[in-house]
Image (tube, rainbow, N blue to C red):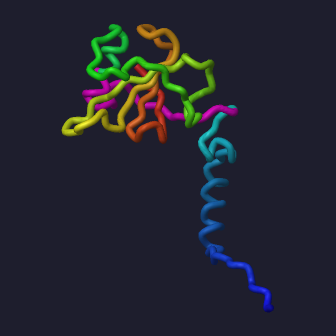
Amino acid sequence: MAAHAPITFPVSKFALTGLLLVALSTGVQAREWFGFRNGQPDTGTIALTELPVQGQKTYAAILKGGPFKFEKDGTVFGNRERQLPRERRGHYREYTVETPGSRDRGAKRIVCGGEQTTPSACWYTADHYASFRRITP
C-alpha cells in the first residue's frame, strides 16, 4: 500500500510577509493585536452619543431602573464568550437595544457591570456578544 502525501494548503509568502509587516509596523504587541490588553479582552470604546438612538434610550432606562420592554432585560449576563473582563457571576446584566423592524429582540445589547442603576461600566454589542465596545459618557 502506498503512503499518501499530507494535504497542504498553499499560502502566499507575500500574504504572510504583509501580515507580519502590518503587525510590526504598528508597534502593537501580539496579545493586543489579537484582542487582549493587560491580560484582559480589549473591547475598544464607543461614545454614548455614537450609540444608535435606541441604545441611548436603553442606557437612560438602565440608569433610571426601567421600565424595560423585554422580560430578559436586567437579567444576569454570564460572559460565557469571555469578551468582557472576568468578574464574579452576577456582576453583569444585559439589556436589549431595540432594532427597528426586527420581529424579535435582535442582536444589539448593552451589558453593564456593578450596581443596576449605578453601573461601574457598560458595553455595547451590535453583533450578539461577538464583540463589545465600552460606552464612554
Farthest-out residue, left: 101
The answer to whether residue 48 is left or right of residue 119 is left
- The location of residue 108, given as percent across then percent down, is 35, 34
The answer to whether residue 70 is left or right of residue 38 is left
- The location of residue 95, given as percent across then percent down, is 38, 23
Q: Quadrant of residue 88?
A: top right
Q: Residue at x 75, y 85 (%)?
A: 4
Where's the N terminus, which quadrant?
A: bottom right
Q: Is residue 41 magenta?
A: yes
Residue bounds of the magenta highlight = 39-57
Farthest-out residue, front: 1
Q: Nearer the viewer, residue 36 or 3?
A: 3
- The location of residue 41, given as percent across then percent down, is 60, 35
Q: Residue at x 36, y 38 (%)?
A: 107
Q: Residue at x 64, y 42 (%)?
A: 32
Q: Is residue 61 above or below residue 54?
A: above
Q: Quadrant of residue 36?
A: top right
- The location of residue 80, given as percent across then percent down, is 57, 33
Q: Nearer the viewer, residue 75 or 58?
A: 75
Q: Is residue 13 above or below residue 97?
A: below
Q: Is residue 70 above or below residue 114?
A: below
The answer to whether residue 1 is left or right of residue 45 is right
The answer to whether residue 19 is left or right of residue 69 is right
